[in-house]
Image (spheres, grey):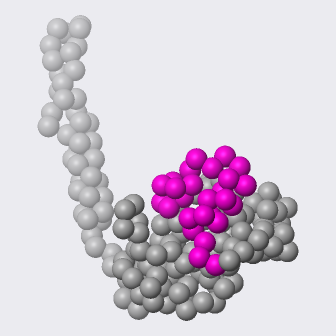
Amino acid sequence: MKLYTYNSKTLQFEKLPFTTKFFKAVFTLILIFSFLGMSTVEVPTQYITDTEDILLVKSSREFSEHRLTQMLKELNLPYPHITLAQAKLESGEFSSRIFKENHNLFGMKEAKVRVNLAKGTQYNHAYYNNWEESVLDYAFWYSSYARKCKTEDELFQLLDQQYAEADQYVLSLKRIISTQQLKEKFNGKN
């Protein structure tokens, strides 16, 4: 490549003498840098094995009351302290067979007429892939049947009439809420 400049005194184009050497040097440097950039420096790649992947998923889905409380806060259901009390009562404080094997926190039956996440029925109760699906299924139940409850008393009345199979279900929920101070878990006091 040659560059010229216009000399207004001689009224002629004149070749710039340094440009050929300059452009050759620049071109050479560009080639060198491009080859250096294209060279393959072996960077060790870390892969997660199938076993590690399973462990990561399992630990991220591991149940704890704290995680349940956080999920209830995120779902923003009205009266989450009642929902937490239901989970505690229905799962025997998270120790029942239905909870451990079915991942069912709320003693839910497999729904037939509403949207649900149940994978089927086992031990006469719905079963889920994980406990989070159980919570989401409860939220679907809530949005289908309890969404019009404007007060705690209305929700307790609905639970007593449509949800509970045990006698004194609402009284048991209220006792759990009171003795374990569940309202405070959602008011930021605990």
Quadrant of image for the C terminus = bottom right
* Residue 179 % position (x, y): 85, 74
* Residue 185 % position (x, y): 78, 65
43 inside magenta stretch: no
At x 57%, y 68%, the residue is 163
Can residue 114 be seen here?
yes
Toward which corner of the image does residue 126 lie, by quadrant?
bottom left
Examine the residues drawn in magenta and state their main secondary structure.
Answer: helix
Does residue 18 sit above or below 113 in this rendering? Answer: above
* Residue 168 % position (x, y): 72, 74
- Near-viewer residue (126 or 128): 126
Q: How many numbered markers are drawn?
A: 0
In this picture, residue 175 sits left or right of residue 120:
right
At x 84%, y 69%, the residue is 178
Q: Which residues are magenta?
A: 140-166
147 inside magenta stretch: yes
Can residue 60 be seen here?
no
Does residue 87 sit above or below 152 in this rendering? Answer: below
In this picture, residue 3 sits left or right of residue 159:
left
- Near-viewer residue (9 or 150): 150
* Residue 153 % position (x, y): 73, 55
